[in-house]
Amino acid sequence: MAPNNNKRPGFEPIRQDSTGKLPPRDTDIEEVVLGALMLEKDAYMNVCDILTPDAFYDPVNAKIYNAICTLGFNQRPIDMMTVTEQLRKDGELEKVGGAVHITELTARVYSAANVEFHAKIIAQKFLARRLINFASQIEADAFDETNDVDDLLQAAEGKLFEISQTHLKREVTQIDPVINLAIEQIQTAANAQSGLSGLQTGYHALDKMTSGWQNSDLIIIAARPAMGKTAFVLSMAKNMSVDYSIPIAIFTLEMANVQLVKRLLSNVADLEGEKIKAGNLTPEEWDRLNTRLRGVFSAPLYLDETPGLSITELRTKARRLVREHGVKMIMIDYLQLMNATGMKFGSREQEVSTISRSLKALAKELNIPIIALSQLNRSTETREDKRPVLSDLRESGAIEQDADMVCFIHRPEYYTRSATDENNNDIRGKAELIIAKHRSGAVGTVDLRFVSKFARFENWEEGYQMVQDAISQVGPTRKLESRMNKESASEEVGGFTFASSGPDIPMPDIMPGPGESPVPF
């Protein structure tokens, strides 16, 4: 028979919300679960990861479960006598109705067979109450006209994300279906024309070392300023979306969409960034831009320039991009400019740790690789060897811990100010992509070529061979005279000197032709 709750010490009457409705609760099931935990010695192990003391609606039941948790944490037996003794030590025994009430709880239960099912009911009721409280608070804040709506929206997203994360749980999986999935992926990789199990980047040495970017991986690409972080991800995004038609999304927190696209045009059309900005192009260059730009139109490349992007905003947008556009990879430029609005932190390091952990969780949830750029601290500048190491990651050691792969961009030429290294090797334009951490593969260094005028990274072997072939054919320098202006000024491109045209060059139409789609930027 159920105890008379209205006479029990510590009992609080059922609370109603502002509409007069009773919040979701089932105190009878709460008492049944408590009785089962004290009746069956192994029952606690089945519910300890489902229930917390605050999941109980009745504060008396919460106090009793808290005593059970204390016993379980200390690996002590859980029964009627030990729970009573623990409540006495905590000074809570009389508040919960004394030893008599503990005895009544155990008398109500004959078996603990369904304790896990009952615990899930309690957890669901608790989640519903949290959502009701959340909605009520948002409603009250929204009526307060002194609150900024944008700040309120950010806080709401952060709180909702926090609630969903605490509720999200994965069930244990027996190994057989996982083995089948692994074999299927291996067979897919074996049959793939590229021979890669992941997404192809267009950088052959990098693809060979990583087998392509792998689904659910968090990849950190870090460097000091001016090393070319944005240029690298933009070059890679161009390779993947334009050359291989892989849908890519870039969240650029540092640059505007138009700025990023201008850099992309410089990359694609072999035009210097300054000439793109000024529009100072010759007719030949306009023709080249017009021709090569048509390969970029309708490319599955999506840009978002939201400043101060929060992890909750990213999560919402990323889900929509994957669902509506089939996006296969997300790039973020860069991690330290993100925030976790709506959550409270004691330090910036804790906030960056939360962002890093959330990015990894998002990569697993969407089952796509996420690449996040990161700044490095200044310690590299004070060392003789300027190559970055893992300890140089800025603001949080959690970035190193959460990432599946950490890569550094290092350009020796930037620091040595020389055309050769100590071994007299040509390092002009050389960029090293240092894979310092690789959870599922090898670490090492991939050599790339950085063409600064075009903000582009290329395969080292191809770029080197192209330059050598050109030099052997035309010599180190040649001058082409403009047909429009005999007195044209010359400009140097990639080691060659080309004549530029005179002023007042009309701008050709480079918009898409009939039937062509606009750029999805």
Image (cartoon, helix red, strand yellow):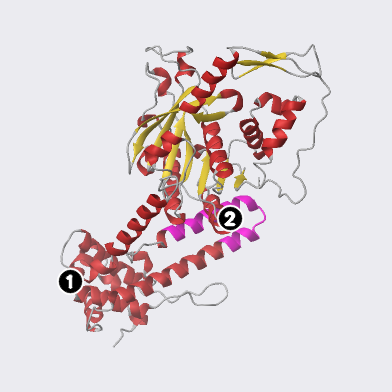
User: Which badge, 2 or 1, comes first in the chain's sequence?
Assistant: 1
- The percent coordinates of residue 416 (x first, y second) are 45, 14
Is residue 366 positioned above or below 513 on the image? below
- The percent coordinates of residue 285 (x first, y second) are 72, 27
User: Quick check: is 150 in the magenta stretch?
Assistant: yes
Q: Is residue 9 visible?
A: no
Q: Residues within 10 Å of mark 2 (few under 14, many from 20)?
A: some
Give the number of callouts. 2
Say which residue label 1 marks: 41
Q: Residues within 10 Å of mark 1 (few under 14, many from 20)?
A: few
Residue type, mark 1 in image: Lys
- Which region is colored magenta? 138-165
Is residue 473 positioned above or below 103 on the image? above
Which sits in the foreground, 35 or 506?
506
Q: As drawn, is 371 to the left or to the right of 480?
A: left
| Among the 4 quarters of the image, the one containing residue 92 | bottom left
Which sits in the foreground, 374 or 394?
374
- The percent coordinates of residue 114 (x first, y second) are 28, 78
Say which residue label 2 marks: 325
Q: As drawn, is 359 to the left or to the right of 112?
A: right
Quadrant in which the N terminus appears: bottom left
User: Quick check: is 271 in the magenta stretch?
Assistant: no
Secondary structure found at label 1: loop
Q: Residue furthest front?
A: 473
